[in-house]
Every structure is written in C-alpha cells, then in structure tokens.
Amino acid sequence: MIKIKLKILDNLIWVILVILIIVNAIIIPRFFTYGNLMNILYHSSVLGFLVIAESLCLITGNFDLSIESTVAFAPAIGVLLMVNWIPGFSPILAMIVTLAVGGVIGLLNGIMIAKFKINPFLQTLSFLIILRGMTYKLIPMSIFNLPQKFIFLGSQKVLFNIPVAVLVMLLGIYLVHIMLTKRIYGRSLIAIGGNERASFISGIDIEKVKIIVFVISGMLAAFAGIIAVGRQQSITNAMGEGLVFMAFAAAVMGGVRLNGGVGTALGMLGGLLVLGVIDNSLTMLGVDAFMVYAVKGILIFAAIVLDNSKTKMREIILFKEELRKLGHSARNA
C-alpha cells in the first residue's frame, strides 16, 4: 500500500494533468480536438528544452537563469552570420555556431560556479542581463526572410500534421530519460544533488559534472532559440523573455526537487504539459492578457508550494509506515 501511495505522490503531476484535460474538455468544446492538442505540444516545444535545461541544473542543486537570454542571443549570432556578417554563410554551420555559443555561455557559467564558487543565482542572473543587453544591441529590429534550412526545425510539419519541433522535443525528453536512468553521468547528477560531500568521497568529479551540466543547459537553450526562430520565422531581441520562470515552475511541478537530488524526464514532460494546457485554455477562454500574466505568477507560487507539500507528505507516509512496523513488531514480541 505504501508503494502505491508513494507512486501516486511521485506522479501527482499526471493526475493533475488528467483532471485539467477533463475539465477543459467539458468547459471548452474545441479543446479536446487533435488540432488543438497538437497545438499545445507545438507551442510547448521551445519551453520544453528550457525545462530540460533548468531541470538538469536543479537536480544538481543549482539553477540557470541565463537560459532565458541565451534563447535570443545564441541564434542572433547565427542569424547575423548568415544575413549581415558573412552573406551566404551556410545555415547548417550557423546552427552549429548557435549551439557552440550556447555551449560557451554554459561553460563560462559552469567554471565560475564550480571552480570559483560563485553563487549560481548571482552568476546566471548577471549573464541573463548581459546577454539580453547584447541582444538588444545586435538586433535592434526583427530580422525576417531567413534561410529555410535554418527555420526548418521550428516551422515544418510531417505526417499527420505533426510539427518537427514536437518530435524533436519528445526525442530530447527520451534522451534525458536514458541519461538519468542508464548512464553514469546522469546518476552522478542525482548523486551530487542528493549529497555533494558523499559524492566527492565516492570519487565523483564534482566540478567536471557541474561544468558539463551548465554546458548542456546552454546548448539546450540555444537549441530552443533555433526552434523559436523557426516557429515565428524571424528573430527578435525579446525572444525568451519570462520563459525561465515558466521553465522553473514546470520543472518543480514535475517533481524536480528545489534542493536537488530528485527528478525524472517523465516528470519534466508532465510539468511542461500542465503549463501548456493551462496557457492554451486561458487563451481559448479569452482571458485578459494581464490576468494570464498573473496566473503565470500563481503557477510559480504553486510549484514552490507543491514541492514543499510533496516533501512533507512523503515524510508523513514514511513515518506512519515506520510506526505501523514498530506496532506490528511489538505485538509479535
């Protein structure tokens, strides 16, 4: 029985998602249609990569605020290479450069945090501001008419009208699942978040693991930027603004612990879909834009409360089970 309770608690986000879908299907007739459900996935694709990036950092007990600005800055470099700096520059190479820029940003964050022990909040906040300012300078106006190869991932659809971005996002979730459950590096992330000192004693290279996770985070944010550019078929200096908080909320709602050591790819997906469903339903109901912004703030607060509540509920369940075992042992004595 206790295993069932803990299983339900660990997958609470999916219970919430099912309830949301049922309620919305009743209230909004057009909600539960193939086109709308696919639309939810499509519009969640950019945020999806940021959720993965933030979750991996959170699992180690850190976080990365700079991913919000990396979404715009990294693809800005790639686009400017093609359009202004080197006309005729290969779109494929531009995508590689974009990912490399994201990786370098993550590397700098990782080195400062892991080696120089800079507070993750201060370090990544400073990069968030620096990169956004540089993006405003580089792209004062939106740039349109981008090469098809560069916007392909975010704009094209395949069989059954499924956006390529959705397939790529789901592939990313699957690869993270494999990494966290089947690979030594993924287990090291969880171990460090659970107990950094014990991980060090066991032989894990703490600094290396942390630096790599920030590099991965930066590259995922850059890739999210490529998807965003493809989705709107242009690049703007405001891309990604406010998304880091939604990524944080989705990660925590999906079961990633704020203090590290716990997190699953399935939970990340669940948290992402809950936010996607809420955002879609508010839009379909015609809720005022300012209220939508307020709701997003409420969701961040709810994520923190949910994380705290799940921890306490788990402790209560385990405590009651211990009492039951002690009582059973006493009766048999």
Image (spheres, grey):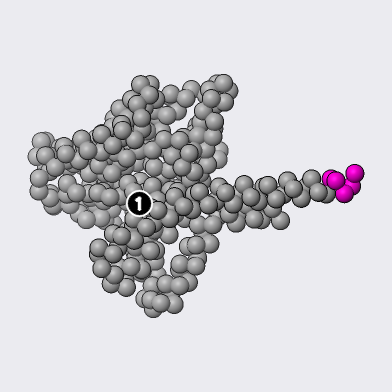
Task: Please state if 89 lies on the left or on the right of 119 as rendered.
Answer: left
Residue type (three-letter) at the residue carrying disc 1: Met
Residue 164 seen in the current view = no
Q: Main secondary structure of the magenta part?
A: helix
* Residue position marked by numbered label 1 in the rendering: 246
Q: Toward which corner of the image does residue 292 lie, by quadrant?
A: bottom left
Residue located at (20% from left, 54% from top): 233
- Nearest the eye: 333 or 63: 333
Indicate the secondary structure of the residue bearing disc 1.
helix
- Nearest the eye: 147 or 102: 102
Q: x, y percentage for residue 178? A: 51, 42
Residue located at (31% from left, 60% from top): 294
- Please identify the residue farthest to the right as the structure is shown: 333
- Nearest the eye: 240 or 168: 240
Task: Please state if 276 lies on the left or on the right of 265 as rendered.
Answer: left
Residue located at (62% from left, 47% from top): 315
- Nearest the eye: 286 or 298: 298
Q: x, y percentage for residue 117? A: 38, 24
Characterize the local packing of mark 1: few (<14), some (14-19) or many (20 or more) Cα atoms within 10 angstroms.
Answer: many
Q: x, y percentage for residue 244? A: 32, 46
Residue 290 seen in the current view = yes
Residue 60 is a magenta residue:
no
Residue located at (74% from left, 48% from top): 323
Q: What range of the chain is rendered magenta?
A: 329-333
Q: How many marks?
A: 1
Quadrant holding the N terminus = bottom right
Q: x, y percentage for residue 37? A: 39, 66
